[in-house]
Image: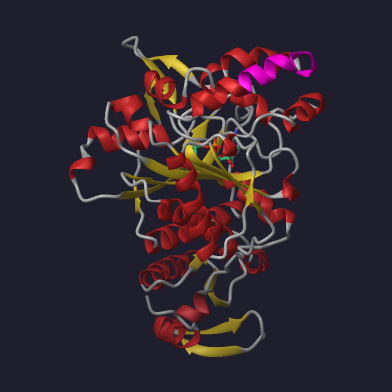
Amino acid sequence: MKFNAPRGTNDILPPEIKKWQYIEDLTHKLFTNYNYQEIRTPIFEYTELFQRGIGEVTDIVEKEMYTFEDKSGRSITLRPEGTASVIRSFLENKIYGQAQPTKYYYIGPMFRYERPQSGRFRQFHQLGVEAIASDDPALDAEIISLGIRLMEELGLEDFELHLNSVGCKSCRPKYVKKLKSFLIENKEDLCDKCRERIERNPLRVLDCKNQSCQSVIKGAPKITEHLCPECDEHFSEVQSFLDILNIEYNINPLLVRGLDYYTNTAFEIKDNALGAQNTVFGGGRYNGLAEEIGNRDIPGIGFALGIERLLLSLDAKGIEVAEEAGIDLYITVIGKKAKREAFRLLDILRNEDFKTEIDYLDRSVGSQMKSADRMNAEYTIIIGEDELENNSATIRNMKSGNEEEIKLSNLLEVMKQLVDKEEI
Ligand code: HAM
């Protein structure tokens, strides 16, 4: 019998995991600087949360959710995204009773039953931020700048920011009505899927990649020209705050996101080196979401970034984020007695934060030295019966080849002198 990981999932093996840790460490540091706090919500939620939050007529809810009944017959869904859960948690824990705004970030796996391809998986990982309970356009700019800053810190500079406003519950329905009649007029030139979408979710037509639909869409009414005065003002304010930060953006009135909760600002960062799945992160405002799932009128804005896509983006540009670090010392042993002493020394050195290793496969000295090389050991020391008897051994710098005779009982002190330890 042979088992494979389920389609669309990945094992993340060392040394790949180094890159993940690097990105996670950077996220904790950077997001904390912007005064966002980490939140962890469950991997699964009751299905209704996503149906109401993301919207019944979205690809995610209609086709992509991992939904099952638990043993008590409740419908459970593996989270396809983080925003609905974060707002559910904000409401459930009555965080609105505290000083606002609330600024959260999260890192973790999400699940969508999509057709796997480069940059698209069934279990993938997002790092996301949500700033809740403020409608300030400066916060929209802060959120966008935070995502861009993360990319820049990683050395990624060649990307495009697409920006749009999708209006609010007062101006959007009027726009959607106009768009609908336009699409009906041009029905003949739309693909089958888009014809279906006219009634169910006409905004999604704007997102269609089909050539013929694209030429129809070019002439479609633009949402940015149909915003109510409040939304229009909010949108220009967002732009002016982005200008203060010298962030370049393309206004893209065709940008509609795949989740229904968005209002006002919507944005995506695209890396054109990535092919079809080129959106590294996306987000926007969701001023109606708390109302939808908890009957409270609380605004919010956020984004989520796909870590796998970020890594592809780094690969495409040949950027190495985390170099494999070697170990400080490899203790080569000859014989059982020496193994016991080496095992004791290993513990002493590790307690003092030296990265140290020994052999666990009873190998020859030659093989042990090969292991030391593979582990990129800075130093090696050989301990056998003689060394034990004379309390003396030779420590070798693997790079320079220099050797030094030391007292075995002084190994820790010698290592302290040799290895430049960073103070923590
Ligand atoms: P989303 O656009 O559905 O938004 O996903 C955000 C990002 O997650 C995408 O830009 C992409 O990098 C990554 N992603 C999505 N699906 C997959 C997949 N199947 N495989 C690999 N990566 C994927 C949201 O999820 C919103 N919750 C973002 C947000 C937060 N809006 C406001 N706050």
Residue ranking furthest to the left:
97
Residue ranking furthest to the top:
73
Q: In the rendered view, how is the structure colored?
A: secondary structure
Q: What secondary structure is the stretch in magenta mostly built from?
A: helix
Decide whether residue 183 is among the magenta residues: yes
From the viewer's perspective, is 238 left or right of 299?
right
Q: Position of residue 160 (x, y in %)?
A: 66, 52
Decide whether residue 370 is among the magenta residues: no
The residue under the point 67% across, 86% down is 400
Q: Is residue 41 visible?
A: yes
| Magenta stretch in the rendered image | 179-190
Which quadrant, please, contains the N terminus?
top right
Is 230 drawn above or below residue 273 in the view shown? above
Which quadrant, please, contains the C terminus?
bottom left
Q: Where is residue 141 in the image (x, y as percent from the top left)?
A: 47, 55
Is 183 drawn above or below residue 109 in the view shown? above
Q: Position of residue 215 (x, y in %)?
A: 79, 29
From the viewer's perspective, is 260 left or right of 160?
left
How many marks overall?
0
Q: Position of residue 67 (x, y in %)?
A: 47, 18
The residue under the point 44% across, 15% down is 68
From the viewer's perspective, is 403 left or right of 392?
right
For ligand 1, which image quadrant applies?
Answer: top right
User: Which of the 4 quarters of the picture holds residue 121?
Assistant: top right
